[in-house]
Image (cartoon, rainbow, N blue to C red):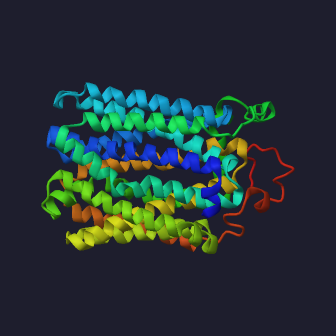
């Protein structure tokens, strides 16, 4: 970790992304609470996150863009575009304009999809290969750990002076993130014309990422486990509103307190992720994260505040472990000219059922007791953890060069590396 912090470009980039997370985390929670206040509906509040997740459906296009251009200038443009988009929320003044919140959150998801794929592809060029796990852990600690303060900032500002300061804060942090990427000394080469020819164009280029995943056992196992888990995981975007209102009998802004505990769990998870991954591998880290998530769902059923706080901390830990394990595995198993599309393909495969799960949660929460939903979530996510933990793939989590004896002689198009 000390080596990572002493690396100039890595420390600058991580600092910029950490500042950007302050605005992101404050905004997404504040928008859900704002819709809840404007409409009085748990379902309407849950649809805020549904709109955000639907924006990630553009991921395959994002992946193609990431693999066609240099990642550094793309990240600068995407962050500046995100700042402009968020400012459109300043036009919302009442319940009749909730549709605009949904529209902006959809665009917000699309921008985040582009930034996520570009970051996954840029990081291996930015830091030494043996520091990828640490770099992903620190980024996830920043992304999730800042929930210690940012939810309270977002919810507090919203309750105190309204949504405008939260919106401006997020727009400002997008601009700061763009500035830190601009300050990097990294000089990327232009995309390789030979790699462009290997894309094949059209449908072949569009589907290259998912074809590579399906032919790479390590990535395929994680995708299957993720597909199982997210059919229930999306309910976490709506159920906490019911936990706060019906279980704890608190007002909507109290959700900011619970999300702060999620940030504390993320800090612990980030500190432990790289050491656990070095000892047990990426698959074990992802499986353990899924198991922690299933346990957290069971604890939330109790509606006893101490256990609810523990559950929220466990959710923070599990999100970090799942993300760090999956992202590091992608970076170590994928050729550089495919990184954007592979990351986007896995993201797209997960987002589609997750969006359906969020929509289902927004509908079910109105007619089904939230405790029943939590029990179902624990069963499904626990099954996905068991599936992944039971797999035994030789060479799991190693680089593509070491897992495939043909890697150096084969074209870099996804032709079946294992």
Q: Residue at x 30, y 41 (%)?
A: 48
Q: Is residue 227 visible?
A: no
- In the figure, residue 50 lies in which quadrant? top left
- In the figure, residue 204 lies in which quadrant? top right
Residue 241 is situated, as x and y percent measured from the top left of the image, at 22, 54
Q: Is residue 27 left or right of residue 367?
A: right
Q: Residue at x 49, y 72 (%)?
A: 386
Q: Residue at x 74, y 33 (%)?
A: 191
Give the position of the N terminus as an image quadrant. Answer: bottom right
Residue 195 is situated, as x and y percent measured from the top left of the image, at 77, 36
Q: Is residue 398 visible?
A: yes
Q: Residue at x 54, y 49 (%)?
A: 14
The total number of labels drawn is: 0
Task: Decide: is 381 above or below 165.
Answer: below
Task: Decide: is 219 above or below 383.
Answer: above
Task: Decide: is 42 above or below 90.
Answer: below
Q: Is residue 262 left or right of residue 98?
A: right
Task: Decide: is 60 above or below 226.
Answer: above
Give the position of the C terminus as an image quadrant. Answer: bottom right
Q: Is residue 336 left or right of residue 49?
A: right
Residue 60 is situated, as x and y percent measured from the top left of the image, at 56, 37
Residue 15 is situated, as x and y percent measured from the top left of the image, at 51, 48
């Amino acid at each position: 970790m000390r080596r990572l912090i002493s690396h100039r470009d890595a420390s600058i980039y991580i600092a910029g992304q950490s500042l950007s997370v302050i605005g992101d985390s404050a905004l997404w929670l504040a928008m859900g609470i704002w819709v809840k206040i404007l409409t009085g509906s748990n379902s309407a509040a849950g649809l805020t996150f549904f709109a955000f997740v639907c924006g990630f459906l553009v991921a395959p296009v994002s992946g193609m863009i990431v693999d066609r251009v240099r990642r550094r200038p793309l990240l600068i443009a995407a962050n500046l575009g995100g700042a402009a988009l968020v400012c459109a929320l300043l036009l919302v003044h009442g319940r009749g304009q909730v549709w605009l919140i949904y529209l902006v959150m959809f665009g917000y998801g699309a921008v985040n999809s582009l930034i996520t794929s570009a970051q996954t592809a840029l990081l291996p060029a930015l830091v030494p290969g043996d520091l990828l796990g640490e770099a992903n852990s620190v980024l996830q600690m920043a992304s999730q750990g800042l929930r210690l303060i940012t939810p309270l900032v977002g919810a507090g500002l919203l309750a105190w002076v309204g949504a405008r300061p939260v919106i401006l804060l997020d727009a400002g942090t997008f601009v700061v993130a763009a500035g830190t990427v601009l300050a990097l000394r990294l000089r990327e080469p232009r995309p390789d014309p030979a790699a462009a020819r290997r894309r094949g164009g059209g449908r072949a280029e569009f589907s290259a990422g998912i074809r590579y995943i399906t032919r790479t056992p390590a990535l395929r196992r994680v995708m299957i486990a993720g597909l199982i888990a997210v059919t229930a995981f999306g309910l976490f975007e709506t159920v906490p509103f019911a936990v706060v209102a019906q279980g704890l009998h608190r007002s909507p802004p109290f959700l900011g307190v619970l999300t702060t505990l999620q940030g504390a769990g993320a800090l612990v998870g980030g500190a432990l992720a790289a050491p656990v991954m070095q000892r047990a591998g990426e698959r074990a880290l992802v499986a353990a994260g899924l198991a922690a998530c299933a346990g957290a769902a069971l604890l939330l059923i109790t509606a006893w505040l101490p256990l609810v706080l523990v559950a929220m901390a466990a959710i923070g830990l599990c999100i970090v472990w799942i993300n760090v394990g999956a992202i590091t595995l992608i970076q170590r198993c994928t050729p550089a000219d495919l990184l954007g599309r592979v990351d986007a393909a896995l993201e797209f495969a997960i987002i589609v059922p997750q969006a359906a799960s969020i929509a289902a949660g927004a509908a079910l929460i109105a007619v089904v007791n939230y405790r029943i939903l939590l029990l179902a979530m624990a069963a499904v996510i626990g099954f996905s953890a068991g599936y992944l933990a039971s797999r035994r793939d030789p060479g799991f989590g190693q680089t593509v060069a070491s897992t495939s004896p043909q890697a150096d002689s084969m074209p870099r198009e996804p032709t079946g590396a294992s």
